[in-house]
Image (cartoon, rainbow, N blue to C red):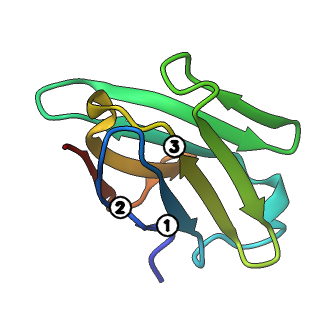
Amino acid sequence: EVPLVESGGGLAQPGGSLRLSCAAPGLTGRFEYYSISWVRQAPGKDVEWVSTSDITGVKYGDSVKGRFTVSRDNAKKVVYLELNSLKIEDTAIYYCESGILRGQGTQVTVSS
């Protein structure tokens, strides 16, 4: 079973919103104890950390703080990343990670 599966990417205009999902059917045990991170990679750039949620709360990278919001449905083993006030520079493939596991990614394109 695939551990992590992202979905919800697509095309949005600057200032728009998208909601990404990270489903974790392959993670066993109490999901709330898993640390789940979102990272992104824009073309030609290094991987950038976006956020991490764990039992203690949620942390965000400076470039997305105040615009992106993480929520979790631990019963469904899903982590959501709400992207608001999107900027062209948010264009990237977004991945969710847990430990050494990473999903296949979902493309977010912000363009007018």
Q: Which residue is mark 3?
A: 38
Left-right relation of 11 to 94: left
The CA distance from mark 1 to mark 3 is 11 Å
Left-right relation of 76 to 57: left
Instruction: Please say if the residues under marks 2 and 3 sit with CB atoms less than 8 Å apart.
Output: no
Left-right relation of 102 to 89: right
Which one is closest to the eye, mark 2 or mark 3? 2
Q: Residue at x 51, y 70 (%)?
A: 3
- Graded by Cα atoms within 10 Å as few (under 14), some (14 to 19) or many (20 or more), the crowding at tag 1 reads many
Query: Which numbered disc flags the more N-terminal residue, 2 or 1?
Result: 1
Residue found at the very far bottom of the displayed protein: 1
- Graded by Cα atoms within 10 Å as few (under 14), some (14 to 19) or many (20 or more), the crowding at tag 2 reads some
The CA distance from mark 2 to mark 1 is 15 Å
Please name the amino acid that badge 1 sits on. Leu
Residue found at the very far top of the displayed protein: 62
Q: Which residue is mark 1?
A: 4
Q: Which residue is mark 2?
A: 9
Residue found at the very far left of the displayed protein: 44
Instruction: Tell me residue 100's x, y (percent).
Output: 49, 47
Q: Secondary structure at mark 2?
A: loop
Q: Secondary structure at mark 1?
A: loop
Q: Secondary structure at mark 3?
A: strand
Instruction: Tell me residue 74's x, y (percent).
Output: 80, 68
- Is 16 or 72 nearer to us in this picture? 16
Residue found at the very far right of the displayed protein: 56
Query: Which numbered disc flags the more N-terminal residue, 2 or 3?
Result: 2
Residue 66 in which image quadrant? top right
